[in-house]
Image (cartoon, helix red, strand yellow):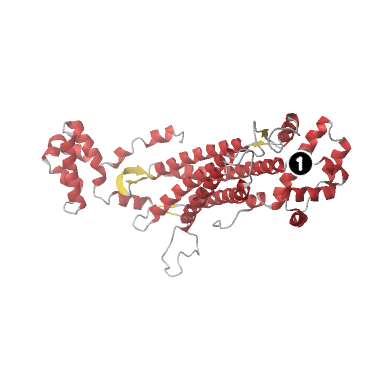
Amino acid sequence: MIPRYTLPPMAKLWSEEAKYGRWLDVELAVCRAWRRTGRIPAKALREIESRARFDVDRILEIEKTVGHHVIAFLTNVNENVGPPSRFIHLGLTSEDVVDTSLILALKQAATLILRKLEGTIDAAAKIALKYKNTPMIGRTHGIHAEPTTFGLKFLVYHQELLRTRERIRRARRAVSVGKIAGPVGTLAQVPPAVEADALRQLGLKPAAAVTQVIQRDRHAEYVAALAICGATLEKIALEIRALQRTEVGEAAEPFRRGQKGSSSMPHKRNPELCERICGLARLLRGWLVAALENVALWHERDISHSSAERIIFPDATTTIYYMLDVMNYVLEGLAVYPRRMKENLETTRGLIFSGRVLVELAAAGASREEAYDVVQRQATRVAAGRVKDLRTALAREPLVKKYLPGKKLSECFRVEYFLRHVDDIFARADMK
């Protein structure tokens, strides 16, 4: 089935219920850390842990009056806990909770994204290996160049996806820090040991130095990794779109039984899934700009980043997760047409072998300039339709007769020559 909507795991992660759940996790971790110092009585901690809960609707109702989401949340939790609630949020500022819980969400989102990315990597690897020796024309500037293979094309994508995976892993590590360091990051109200204890419970390490917030270069790196991932998916999608064009016809995205491509033209099979991926990649790049602009804040903190991040992080992580889901569907059902690839190899009637003829002429003793002029002149005649093919045209040239007589010239027009190191390239990429 074609993926079309926001997918449940990521949607659930960014729900209000999940957000307040993370806030509560942070508060409880700090309470446990305080307990180990003796600051909170054991009985109070037990009551806090057994009674602490929240109701999203009630929080929103309180927020209408107090105008502060963290205070609204704490008020609701305190309503349920009772007198021991005086120990909740002890020494904390709002961003200790909000910033640290955001990091928890980003870690979880990155894990979901990496799991989905594994499917993309595997799909690209399968295509690369299956079509490792399937010859096709290589194109530079959109013009026929020299032969390559469809498998090599996807090996390039596979290697890029591996680098993308490492970038996202690095970004996940970069954001895996928290802070329980107070209003300006001085740890004045919460000792370093309490901070470290609380964050350890949450699977985080303390950021070495903070202000009221964790510094946003980490977050920008995270969004950059997602944007680069999106650019790679766009690159693959753009190639499939190009190969699906009627005059090329070498590959196509899946087209399921009963699917319609156009409301007015029944013959149409449009690459709309790949076009969708390309469009969404533009959004990711836009969110990266906002994430970069969030790095610079006034003094120890202002709130200009907060409103943007409420959009950036849920939307960027959900979007890349969805793009990966769509790409996996496309790659798993990709239609490949080797026969059309062979036909396209022969379209230019030997022009794609001009480079090898040039090299062989020079190697045999001709000057490179003279050889280039001869090959280019005859290539122009072939392209204009005045000569049957390049081999026939060159065979009449005195320079070619002198340096590449008969069989030597014919050897220059073998596709296999250009593909003789394909196995070496795959081995270098550790793909066998």
Left or right: 207 with respect to 249?
right
Q: Residue at x 76, y 48 (%)?
A: 71
Residue 185 image point, x, y percent: 68, 35
Can you say which quadrant of the picture contains the N terminus? bottom right
- The residue that appears at 39% across and 33% down in the rendered structure is 424
Residue drawn at point x = 68 percent, y = 40 percent? 100
Please state the total of marks drawn on the protein image: 1
Judging from the image, what secondary structure is the residue with disc 1 in? helix
Would you say residue 391 is visible in this rendering?
no
**263 and 168: which one is in front?**
168
- Is residue 269 or residue 218 the one in the foreground? 218
Kindly identify the amino acid type of the residue bearing the numbered disc 1: Glu
**Of 129 and 33, which appears nearest the observer?**
33
Question: Which quadrant of the figure contains the C terminus?
Answer: top left
Residue 33 picture location, percent across and down: 78, 34
In the depicted structure, whether residue 278 falls above or below residue 200: below
Q: Position of residue 313 (x, y in %)?
A: 60, 48
Disc 1 target residue: 27
Q: Position of residue 77 (x, y in %)?
A: 80, 48
Is 320 placed left or right of 183 in the picture? left
Q: Is residue 70 left or right of 339 when viewed as pictured?
A: right
- Give the crowd class for mark 1: few <14, some 14-19, many >=20 residues within 10 Å: many
